[in-house]
Amino acid sequence: MSSPLETPEFGTLYVGNTKDDDGPVIDSLVQEVDTPATPVVQAISPAPLIRTKRNTRLLSGTLIFDNTVVATYAPIQILPADLQRLEWSIQAFSYAAAPTSGDYVYLADENGKLPSSSAGRLRNGSILNLDDHNGALWVLPSPGLTGLFEVSYWATTGIF
């Protein structure tokens, strides 16, 4: 609130706001209500979750079967059953100078299927890629190998 200013040179000067109206102005901005406000309920649209790419693990290995001791080999499990497996690949290669039709390995998902007509054959130079098989994978060399026989495999599996 301002009040009159008195000076010897000019006498009484009326400057500023001599009427204090702050109270009525503030009251005009705020409305008093006896009842509480009605709550407004709105559905919040959920933001899509950001999924980070999961880590994977590479399972790989190489087996070399010796044709001179092929009768001593038992079935070998190269991949265990894995529900998180994403994909796998297996490749065969014969070191024989002239590979024959006897140069192959048996493949099966169970130990008891090797060797039998229930097992598949992976021949020299073959590559097998399967993305949907998450069971075990067993391998056994053919008794008709004519030289060293290499089997290499790769699989990716999720880690949680």
Image: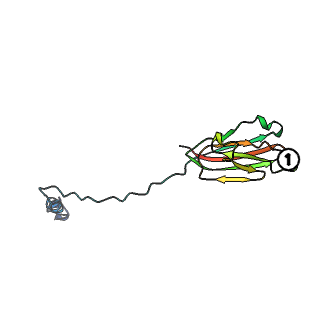
Image position, residue 6 (x, y; %): 17, 60
Q: Which residue lies at the image location 58% right of the left edge and 43% below the top edge? A: 82
Image position, residue 124 (x, y; %): 78, 51
Query: Eyeballing the image, is 17 above or below 63?
Result: below
Q: Which residue is mark 1?
A: 96
Q: Quadrant of the N terminus?
A: bottom left
Q: Nearer the viewer, residue 101 or 99?
A: 101
Q: Is residue 70 left or right of residue 7?
A: right
Image position, residue 71 (x, y; %): 78, 36
Q: Which residue lies at the image location 69% right of the left edge and 53% below the top edge? A: 128
Q: Secondary structure at mark 1?
A: loop
Q: Is residue 140 left or right of residue 33?
A: right
Q: Residue furthest front?
A: 117
Amino acid type assigned to the residue bearing label 1 in the image: Ala
Q: Is residue 92 left or right of residue 29?
A: right
Q: Nearer the viewer, residue 63 or 114?
A: 114
In which quadrant of the rendered view does residue 20 lie?
bottom left
Q: Residue furthest top?
A: 72
Query: Eyeballing the image, is 76 above or below 51?
Result: above
Q: Which residue lies at the image location 77% right of the left edge and 44% below the top edge? A: 150
Picture colour scheme: rainbow
Q: Is residue 12 left or right of residue 126?
A: left
Q: What is the tally of numbered marks visible in this picture?
A: 1
The 10 Å Cα crowd at callout 1, few under 14, some 14 to 19, many 20 or more, is some
